[in-house]
Image (spheres, rainbow, N blue to C red):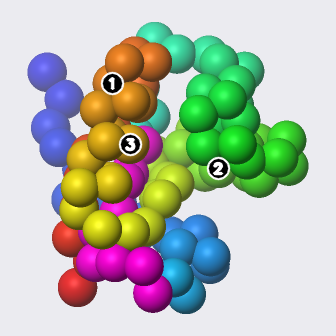
């Protein structure tokens, strides 16, 4: 059984850091199930990201273990997390400090 990594690189998308829309983020986590092409598809389909941004975020999920895909108010981020779960992706809500 693997332990939980405590030294995760918390790299955040620059656009997410400069947003003033809220104090919450949607984080998508790497998992051993979903293909990289599928994660890119979800980012393009649900969030409307262009191909380059969707692929960049997907690669961040794949290489860093996580990516912040949205910043905003708590209710909106809860909807995003729920939607990611609906697509079969592992996602969580985190408060920005």
Q: How many marks?
A: 3
Q: Secondary structure at mark 3?
A: helix
**Residue placed most toward the observer, 88 or 60:** 88
| Quadrant assignment for the C terminus | bottom left
Q: Which residue is mark 1?
A: 85
Q: Secondary structure at mark 1?
A: helix
Region of the chain picked out in magenta, as a range: 20-28
- First-in-chain label (3 vs 1): 3
Residue at image position (48%, 59%) is 70
Residue at image position (17%, 43%) is 4
Q: Which residue is mark 2?
A: 57
Q: Examine the image and state in which quarter residue 37 appears.
A: top right
Residue 49 visible in image: yes
- First-in-chain label (3 vs 2): 2
* Magenta stretch: includes residue 42: no
- First-in-chain label (1 vs 2): 2
Reply above or below: 35 against 25: above
**Residue placed most toward the observer, 79 or 26:** 79
Residue 10: x and y in percent read 41, 69
Q: Which residue is mark 3?
A: 80
Mark 1 → mark 2, Cα distance in angstroms: 17 Å
Reply above or below: 60 against 9: above
Residue 29: x and y in percent read 40, 40
Q: Residues within 10 Å of mark 2 (few under 14, many from 20)?
A: many
Residue 19: x and y in percent read 51, 82
């Amino acid at each position: 059984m693997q332990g939980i990594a405590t030294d995760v690189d918390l790299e955040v998308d620059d656009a997410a850091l400069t947003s003033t829309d809220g104090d919450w983020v949607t984080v998508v986590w790497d998992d051993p199930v979903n293909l990289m092409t599928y994660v890119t598809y979800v980012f393009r389909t649900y969030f409307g990201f262009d191909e380059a941004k969707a692929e960049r975020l997907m690669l961040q999920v794949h290489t860093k273990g996580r990516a912040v895909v949205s910043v905003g108010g708590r209710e909106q981020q809860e909807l995003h997390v729920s939607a990611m779960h609906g697509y079969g992706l592992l996602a969580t809500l985190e408060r920005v400090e």
